[in-house]
Image (spheres, rainbow, N blue to C red):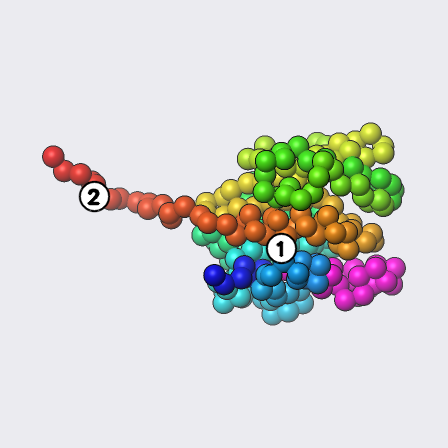
Amino acid sequence: MRPVRVMIWNEFIHERTDSKIASVYPHGIHHTIAQGIGEYGFQIGTATLEQPEHGLTEEVLRATDVLIWWGHLAHDQVSDEVVTRIQRRVLEGMGLIVLHSGHRSKIFQRLMGTSCDLKWREDAKRELLWVVNPAHPITQGIGEFIDLRPEEMYGEFFDIPAPDELVFISWFEGGEVFRSGCAYTRGLGKIFYFRPGHEAYPTYYHKQILLVIANAVRWAASAHGTAPTFGNTAPFVTF
């Protein structure tokens, strides 16, 4: 069997414009994630905002099993044409993993049909990321919870549709809770939103976080059902 083909997309602005963030991710968040999940045997590529077509041409997406998305400052700069292209591939069966502030990306909002807005606070305090669906394959090898510090707070209400499967819930020192691991299907595609990963904190070096992402890649790339047939059709049986 061929390896799962993963494309990691990052707008790659913070790391080039803010020295503090560059000190955490000197080669970009996409590069750190690629290195971190490289040991799991995936075929990995990366793409960034400033590339032609944001590095996500028809050919690239056709050769992608799972797209990982990180964005924050430049959601509005992502081409609507590219968003439509990604949406089409998800509906056809490409997996999509949306990380952290990617909740406000055009592609996640389009697939969810809501604002995907939330509360937030940059206080660099503790987060406990609790497994609430231990039977789900994304939680394999994680244990009961992940202890993260420092992290940014995201709080409810999170304006998303009710997840098909809720995998993680976060608790923060300020008392907030948040649905931090949400799994969906759209068409033949599997989508996973995963909350941790503020750009100023070294979250994407954390072994358990990287394991969750690797598990999510395998889940999102796993076998799909038969593509449905639409439109006018002849009867299957005649009597």
Which mark, residue 68?
Answer: 1
Q: Residue 14 colored magenta?
A: yes
Q: Is residue 158 left or right of residue 57?
A: right
Residue 215 position in % (x across, y down): 62, 49
Report the residue at 80% width, 61% height from top: 25
Report the residue at 51% width, 42% height from top: 185
Q: Give the extent of the magenta segment.
A: 7-32
**How many neighbours does mark 2 have within 10 angstroms: few (below 14), some (14-19), or many (20 or more)?**
few
**Residue sitting nearer the eye, 110 or 151:** 151
- Mark sitting earlier along the chain (2/1): 1
Kindly report the distance in space between the C-alpha atoms of the residues bearing marks 2 and 1.
40 Å
Callout 1 amino acid: Ile
The nearer-to-camera label among 2 and 1 is 1
Residue 98 position in % (x across, y down): 64, 49
Report the residue at 56% width, 55% height from top: 66
Residue underneath mark 2: 234
Q: Is residue 209 left or right of residue 24?
A: left
Residue 47, picture quadrant: bottom right
**How many neighbours does mark 1 have within 10 angstroms: few (below 14), some (14-19), or many (20 or more)?**
many
Callout 2 amino acid: Ala
Residue 121 position in % (x across, y down): 83, 40
Q: Residue furthest top?
A: 175
Q: Is residue 154 visible?
A: no
Q: Residue 131 colored magenta?
A: no
